[in-house]
């Protein structure tokens, strides 16, 4: 066994047992182990890590940890854009697009309402399928499952710490700095299809009497035909996002 000193910074401590939080600790390891392996063996998915310093020098995930190394592991810092040096992965897709793990249906609806291309598989996909989709379609994988995010196929991902869907949305908007990418037109909440304006006369027979009476602007999903109008939840979500954006700008 050899020993290196590791320290994890900021919210990466969420993944560590109390005795390893906010402090440098001795980390015994067998020789020829990559820093990525040791980070994940400590409980931190590689998707959460944005910068690794070994003895104050940036290293990539493949770096073979040496006995006596001092390793510092950092999460994403919005205020600290990294140059090419020390970058662990290509930049995330822009505009951002996502694939979501099970039990994240409400977050999927929020992201679609804000216009983000968001896959939320309804059939039973296993972890391997989700990782493959994220990889093949260059999507950011959102999950509460650390093990899924530790899969090596996953390049971009984020581990949601909470079950509260509004807190989840807040965290994702901050983590990937999405405020400037929010669209006025949502994606279809049912199928992620693209919405287009449609004339009221063309869909009159599909509207409930009250909708017919009170609304004049409609959109239709190009993929599944679902009809949308500015319902009651939609302005509320915009207001919610405006509030978090304000907090973001002030921080
Ligand atoms: Zn649709």
Image (tube, helix red, strand yellow):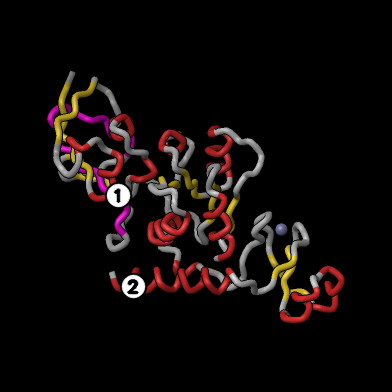
Numbered badge on residue 75: 1
Quick check: is 63 in the magenta stretch?
yes
- For disc 2, the marked residue is 249
Whether the residue carrying mark 2 lies under 8 Å from ligand 1 is answered with no
Q: Which of 212/149 is in front? A: 212
Among the 4 quarters of the image, the one containing residue 64: top left
Report the image quarter containing ligand 1. bottom right
Q: Left or right: where does residue 199 sit relative to residue 132?
A: right
What percent of the width, then of the height, locates residue 142? 48, 47
Segment tinted magenta in the rendering: 61-77
Q: Residue at x 66, y 39 (%)?
A: 123
Q: Left or right: where does residue 248 sit relative to residue 185?
A: left
What percent of the width, then of the height, locates residue 112? 58, 60
Image quarter of the N terminus: top left
User: Which of the two marks, 2 or 1, is nearer to us in this view?
Assistant: 2
Among the 4 quarters of the image, the one containing residue 122: top right
Numbered disc 1: secondary structure: loop
Q: Which of 233/60 is in front? A: 233
- Single out the residue that lies furthest toward the top: 1
- Single out the residue that lies furthest toward the front: 210
**21 to 166, vertically: above or below:** above
Among the 4 quarters of the image, the one containing residue 53: top left
Q: Which of 216/3 is in front? A: 216
What percent of the width, then of the height, locates residue 113? 58, 64
Quick check: is 141 in the magenta stretch?
no
Numbered badge on residue 14: none
């Amino acid at each position: 066994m050899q020993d290196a000193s590791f320290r994890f910074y900021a919210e990466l401590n969420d993944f560590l047992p109390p005795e390893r939080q906010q402090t440098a600790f001795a980390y015994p390891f067998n020789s020829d182990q990559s820093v990525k392996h040791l980070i994940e063996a400590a409980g931190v998915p590689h998707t959460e890590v944005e910068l690794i310093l070994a003895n104050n020098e940036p290293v990539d995930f493949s770096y073979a940890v040496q006995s006596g190394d001092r390793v510092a592991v950092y999460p994403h810092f919005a205020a600290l854009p990294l140059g090419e040096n020390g970058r662990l992965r290509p930049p995330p897709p822009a505009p951002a697009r996502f694939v979501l793990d099970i039990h994240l249906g409400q977050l999927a609806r929020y992201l679609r309402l804000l216009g983000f291309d968001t896959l939320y598989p309804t059939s039973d996909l296993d972890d391997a399928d989700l990782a493959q989709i994220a990889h093949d379609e260059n999507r950011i994988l959102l999950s509460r499952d650390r093990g899924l995010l530790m899969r090596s196929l996953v390049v971009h991902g984020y581990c949601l710490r909470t079950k509260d869907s509004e807190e989840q949305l807040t965290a994702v908007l901050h983590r990937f700095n999405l405020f400037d990418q929010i669209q006025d037109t949502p994606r279809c909440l049912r199928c992620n299809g693209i919405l287009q304006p449609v004339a009221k006369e063309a869909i009159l027979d599909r509207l409930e009497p009250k909708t017919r009476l009170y609304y004049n602007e409609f959109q239709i999903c190009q993929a599944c035909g679902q009809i949308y109008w500015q319902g009651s939840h939609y302005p509320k979500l915009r207001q919610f996002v405006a509030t978090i954006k304000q907090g973001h700008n002030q921080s």
